[in-house]
């Protein structure tokens, strides 16, 4: 099984918040972790926000950044192509998604279509999670 992580799920790999342990356990059982290229700057923005608002220390932030940068090369990273961007526009319109959420869903669908392994779409954004389920993807959390 391949776990596709949107940014909300990716951030939970590094930030101990509700659902953190369960997500990490589920991800550890996966053959591979996948995400869109847009997840990297989105995760960095989320980490920087935690630092700016005092919800994390400089030391915690530096440790998170090291872990993300080390892990990033091991992720299956879905590239942004003109075809994927058009598909993202279609799913944004169909499901009422924001721009980057539509890129995540289009990336997950792209991976599902091309993978022999089962793909589970992991997201903590309710609208994106529901759209992925409507689009025929297996989702986590259930």
Image: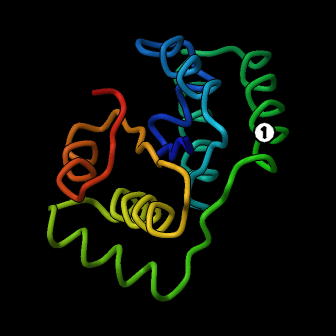
- Asked which quadrant contains residue 87, the reply is bottom left
Few, some or many residues within 10 Å of mark 1 (<14, 14–19, 20+): few
Front residue of 119 and 11:
119
Q: How is the image coloured?
A: rainbow
Determine whether 7 is above or below 59 in the image: below
Please give the residue where the numbered disc 1 appears in the rendered image: 71
Residue lying at the far front in this picture: please name it: 116
Residue 9 is situated, as x and y percent measured from the top left of the image, at: 48, 34
- Asked which quadrant contains residue 62, the reply is top right
Determine whether 53 is above or below 79 in the image: above
Q: Residue, x 69% and y 14% (percent of image)?
A: 57
Residue 25 is situated, as x and y percent measured from the top left of the image, at: 57, 17
Classify the position of the C terminus by image quarter: top left
Q: Residue, x 85% and y 38% (percent of image)?
A: 70
Residue 101 is situated, as x and y percent measured from the top left of the image, at: 35, 56
Determine whether 58 is above or below 32 in the image: above
């Amino acid at each position: 099984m391949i776990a596709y992580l949107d940014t909300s799920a990716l951030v939970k790999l590094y930030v101990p918040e509700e659902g953190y342990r369960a997500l990490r356990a589920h991800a550890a059982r996966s053959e591979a972790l996948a995400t869109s290229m847009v997840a990297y700057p989105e995760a960095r923005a989320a980490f920087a926000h935690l630092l700016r608002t005092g919800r994390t220390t400089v030391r915690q932030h530096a440790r998170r950044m090291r872990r993300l940068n080390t892990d990033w090369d091991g992720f299956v990273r879905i590239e942004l192509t003109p075809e994927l961007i058009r598909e993202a526009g279609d799913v944004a319109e169909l499901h009422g998604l924001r721009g980057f959420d539509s890129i995540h869903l289009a990336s997950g669908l792209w991976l599902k279509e091309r993978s022999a392994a089962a793909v589970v779409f992991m997201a903590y954004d309710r609208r994106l999670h529901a759209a992925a389920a409507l689009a025929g993807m297996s989702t986590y959390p259930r």
